[in-house]
Image: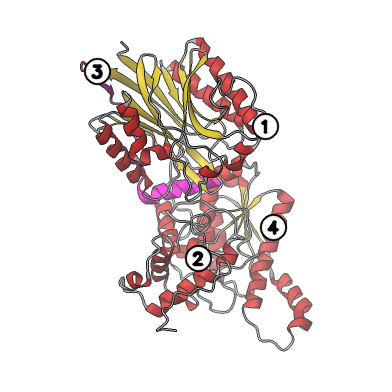
Amino acid sequence: MTKKLTIAFAQINPTVGDIRGNLALIRSAREKAAAAGADLLVTPELCLVGYPPEDLVLKPEFLIEAQAALRDLMADTADGGPGILVGAPIPDQKLQENPFKKAFTTTGSEIYNAAVLLDAGGLVAWRGKHFLCDYSVFDEKRVFKVGALTGPFAFRGVRVGVFICEDMWDADVCETLAEAGAEMLIGINGSQFNSGKGDTRMQLAVQRVTECELPLAYLNMVGGQDDIVFDGGSFVLNADCTLQAQAPQFEEHLLVTEWARGEEGGWACLPAEKHAPEEDLAAVYRALVLGVRDYIRKNHFPGIVIGMSGGIDSALSAAIAVDAIGAERVRCVMMPSPYTSADSLEDAERAAEMLGVRYDSISIGPAMKAFEEMLAPMMAGTAADTTEENIQARSRGLTLMAISNKLGFMVLSTGNKSEMSVGYATLYGDMCGGYNALKDVYKTKVFALSRWRNAHRPTDTLGPDGPVMPERIITKPPSAELKPDQKDQDSLPEYDVLDGILECLIEEELPLADILARGYDEETVYRIWRMLDLAEYKRRQSAPGVRVTLRDLARDRRYPITNAFRGRPRSVV
């Protein structure tokens, strides 16, 4: 009877579609696991192809390459080293034969999001994910088949119960595995980050352990994929719910654990390394940095260009960019107009100096004059309004896109969630860009993150120690500076009020009575509600950005653009 087992959990950062690169990552992790004396290497959900692959799994060529990589991994295990539990797509060929023995060439088969156990040069077993994600950024029911409730895998004399991500969020899968004789539970996950998610995962894991009376290991992916960030933080709980091991967040890591069978037959993980989870602001900041870094790296952009206004959003975006990819790959451009204040000019240049980035200044005055002359016949007899303000923003957007085209650098747009929610942004102007670090960050959080970064520097960042922006950028009243003496609060409520109402409307979807019960003015709530709905057409055309809240403005909040509902009771109309 097996009495000891060494399990290595590979918290790695795969790239969607880069099957050969992901294969190399897994092989590298296996080499390290073998050097540590591991019996089993565990890898995250669908790590062989990257997660989420979305409709890529519908392409036969994609599945053919994935199966070839699985065969390569299977052959690797013939060397007597660690077995591999790998996440991979498996086509349903009616289970009449090894599902990756030969190339998959038909287009009508159904696909499983599977956990595949390889050992001694062969396939031990595999199972499909039972609870498929069909919410938020995930839509697995479109492309995957529901896996059956099954029993544990037999691995070197141990009955290992394997679940896949969402399978832990319901009791059925783990209870079935326990009832079928599992001696431990191992979950492979691609669980996205949002603020507070770590506590939720741990609570659910404790619940499953309590129900099943089995130790549980939770391996999570790390890395950025479009608007998703996977934060790692993998951990192991013993059957008494004690935390025995925990990997760091937001970085790749090989967590090696020793397991022993007790005299009464139960398995326990021996104490191993434990990395404390990040506090909220640190976690959000590191998620933003990782999201930007991987978007640039995985899409092969040489660098980032940012419109530097002297305001807090562009200053924080620039700090995130430098922390993500280094100062030498970031360029900041000030584009002053006649309404740009001396303070903004000074603050923008000083922030660039503090970050160590190249700083250029390009006046948009000539562009404003050219548009004024060009449009004069059409606009004769009309008063100046937001049209002229938007021309300024669009002149800046055009300038940044020209620099991007010439240098290949990606424009990082700088709008925050508060502004994107209510449409306080110019389409084809300051909304221009390939990615947006602050898209899911409310303005009040922007202030908090800026203060935090001025006082802290995460260890995995490439930016400078010490403050990254002048204090005045944080303390001065925000302004778009598109007309004389303009302030954001001329058009919007104070940001603590605005953000509080927006959280009620977006994150919580509260009814009006509940929002008013929190002390908000009724007319202000209706005004913000209307602005939120009217700005939907802008958001549909905005750049993707890092998701850090429970409900972002892209795939979580799905409202129609054409929408006449305003929510007022008939007695009020």
Please name the residue shown 60% across and 44% down the image: 296
Task: Give the mark nearest the N terminus, 3 or 4.
Answer: 3
Mark 4 = which residue?
401
The foreground one among 41 and 206 is 206
Mark 1 = which residue?
61
Marks 4 and 2 close (CB-CB < 8 Å): no
| Horizontal relation, residue 406 to residue 213: left or right | right
Q: Which residues are magenta?
A: 263-292
Magenta region includes residue 278 = yes
Task: Give the mark nearest the N terminus, 1 or 3.
Answer: 1
SS type, badge 3: loop
Return the residue found at the far bottom: 381
Task: Give the mark nearest the N terminus, 2 or 1.
Answer: 1
Nearest to the eye among marks 2 and 3: give it: 3
Residue 456 visible to the viewer = no
The Cα atoms of the two marked residues, 4 and 2, are separated by 24 Å
Task: Give the mark nearest the N terminus, 4 or 2.
Answer: 4
Nearest to the eye among marks 4 and 1: give it: 1
At label 1, the amino acid type is Glu
Mark 3 = which residue?
265
Return the residue found at the far left: 264
Q: Position of residue 56 (x, y in %)?
A: 62, 39
Please name the residue shown 38% across and 61% down the image: 508
At label 4, the amino acid type is Met
Q: Position of residue 235 (x, y in %)?
A: 35, 33
